Amino acid sequence: VVGVVVIALAVARAPVARFAPVVYPESPAARLAIAAVTLALLFNVFFNYYHAVVAEPGSVAHLPTPVNPRPFDDEAWESESESAGVRGTRNPNHAPDEGAAEVTRGVFAGCRLCVPCGRAKPRGAHHCRTCRKCVGGMDHHCPFIGNCVGDGNTRHFVLFCLYVAVGCGWSVAWAAACARADADGYRAFHDALFDYDAYGKRALTIAGERGGSMDDLANVNGASAFLKALFAWTYATLKAAKMNVRAAFEQSPEWVNAWAFVCTIGGVICVATAGLFASTLNAVASGETYVEALKSRSSRGGGGGGGAG
């Protein structure tokens, strides 16, 4: 949760504090408009994220606990439900508890028995091994919200994904606009980052310090010498690349740091959440959750299950 909040604030801060002053240096109204849109997106992200995290994803507690429950397969249930309209059986030699609540005939219709919970599991509900409970209309367990996505919070989860994708796309768009507005600053960063002459000189120097100079390579004899030269050049290429990146950022304007963060982290999050939004919305529209789709493919292919039952 803390990581999601910190990253969201960092991505949202960039258009307001770094990009807008470069794109509109003499227009306070434009910068204010950018800040207002950014805050609106950020509010919707946090509002829906909060409700997706704290909401009950889908409770099945309204169903009574079966007495003497037994597992059964779908075929047994179909024949049993058609004849009796109930789910589960009661041992004829077992006397019910005096304080047990009266169960209406047919209350378990359409249910299955959840073996880990020992409770009735209505159609569309699945047992989450992480939450250790059955969730009605469960789509999947999301580690980013620390909760399952079910009937109770699907709406907020879908809106959270939508606003995150739109918000990250908003920041990436202003990052691109900033790079166009300060083309000289971006070109200085690009030229320093891809300065292959400086990179080659750094790599040769570092490799020579570790026994991987050109003379050392010419005299390589034996496996140990070869491995030593290979390690020297592997280290040199990585270290020289790191030095090139550091030099590029040191020679560039301040907005470049935010630009790189938004284009990499924000861009990846934008694509990932957009895909998650589309898949979850498709599941809602089709009436088949992600867990049920996995079970369908598994039954057709004869494979095993996943993290829900």
Image (tube, rainbow, N blue to C red):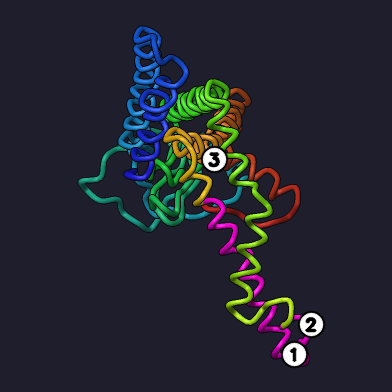
**Magenta region, residue range:** 216-245
Upstream in the sequence, badge 3 or badge 1? 1
Is residue 231 on the magenta stretch?
yes
- Which residue shows up at 44% across the image and 30% down it? 157
Give the amino acid type for the residue marked by disc 2 in the picture: Ala
Residue 245 at x, y percent in the picture: 54, 51
Name the residue carrying label 3: 264
Of residues 145 and 149, the one drawn nearer to the viewer in this rendering: 145
Q: Earlier in the sequence, mark 3 or mark 2?
A: 2
Residue 243's spot in the image, x, y percent? 53, 57
Q: Residues within 10 Å of mark 2 (few under 14, many from 20)?
A: few
Q: CA separation, marks 3 and 1?
A: 40 Å
Q: Main secondary structure of the magenta part?
A: helix
Give the camera-side residue of 104 and 48.
48
Q: Hey, what amino acid is under mark 3?
A: Thr
Whether pointer 3 and pointer 1 mark residues with C-beta atoms closer than 8 Å, the reply is no
Determine which residue is flagged by label 2.
218
* 92 inside magenta stretch: no
Q: CA distance from mark 2 to mark 1?
A: 14 Å
Residue 223 is marked as 1
Say which label, 2 or 1, has the lower sequence index: 2
